[in-house]
């Protein structure tokens, strides 16, 4: 899976774009194929180290996404494959970010994206 990630906080040049392992939806989790992300000021602060928090390494950057459910783990009833979803507030507090082809989250971290005619 392709992702934008850093190994440590720093300037924009520290961002790598490359392959990381493909996640799998475990119990209570949902695998989302990411279709859109955005860059917020907090993303820059986290990546640069201005907002000092512990980060796993490698750390996938980004906090917001829109995507489609690709896989649901055991116990997930709120979502089904093909549902359009969005989430924010990722990419800090020990959670990986959103700038990747696919991401896995607890189903409670996602919301349905209901668009008329979509």
Image: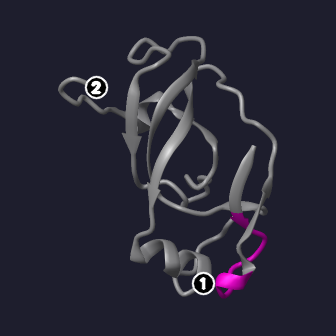
Q: Residue at x 63, y 44 (%)?
A: 101
Where residue 35 appears, x then y in whole percent?
49, 43
> Would residue 81 appear left or right of 2 to someone viewing this image?
left
Q: Mark 1 or mark 2, which is nearer the start of the sequence?
A: 1
Q: Secondary structure at mark 2?
A: loop
Q: Is residue 81 above or below residue 24?
A: above
Q: Is residue 68 magenta?
A: no
Q: Which residues are magenta?
A: 5-13
Place of residue 115 in the rendered image (x, y in percent of width and height, measured from the top left): 22, 30
In the image, what residue occupies the spot 56% across and 35% down?
A: 33
- Specify whether residue 7 is painted magenta: yes
Residue 83: give x, y in percent of width and height.
40, 22
Q: SS for tag 1?
A: helix
To which residue does mark 1 refer? 48
Name the disc covering residue 118, or none. 2
| Disc sitting over residue 20 in the figure | none
Badge 2 density bin: few <14, some 14–19, many ≥20, Cα 10 Å:
few
Query: Dividing the image into 4 quarters, which one contains the N terminus?
Result: top right
Q: Is residue 91 above or below residue 25?
A: below
Distance CA(mark 2)–CA(mark 1): 37 Å
**Vertical placement of 41 versus 24: above or below?**
below
Q: Position of residue 48 (x, y in %)?
A: 60, 84
- Residue at 59% from the left image edge and 53% from the top image edge: 95
Residue at the outermost left position: 116
């Amino acid at each position: 899976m392709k992702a934008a990630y850093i190994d440590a906080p720093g300037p924009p040049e520290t961002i790598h774009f490359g392959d990381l392992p493909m996640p799998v939806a475990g119990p209570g989790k949902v695998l989302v194929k990411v279709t859109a992300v955005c860059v917020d000021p907090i993303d820059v602060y986290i990546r640069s180290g201005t907002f000092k928090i512990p980060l796993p390494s490698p750390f996938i950057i980004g906090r917001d996404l829109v995507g489609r459910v690709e896989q649901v783990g055991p116990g997930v009833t709120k979502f089904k494959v093909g549902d359009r979803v969005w989430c924010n507030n990722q990419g800090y507090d020990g959670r990986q970010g959103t700038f990747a082809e696919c991401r896995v989250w607890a189903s409670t971290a996602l919301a349905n994206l209901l668009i008329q005619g979509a």
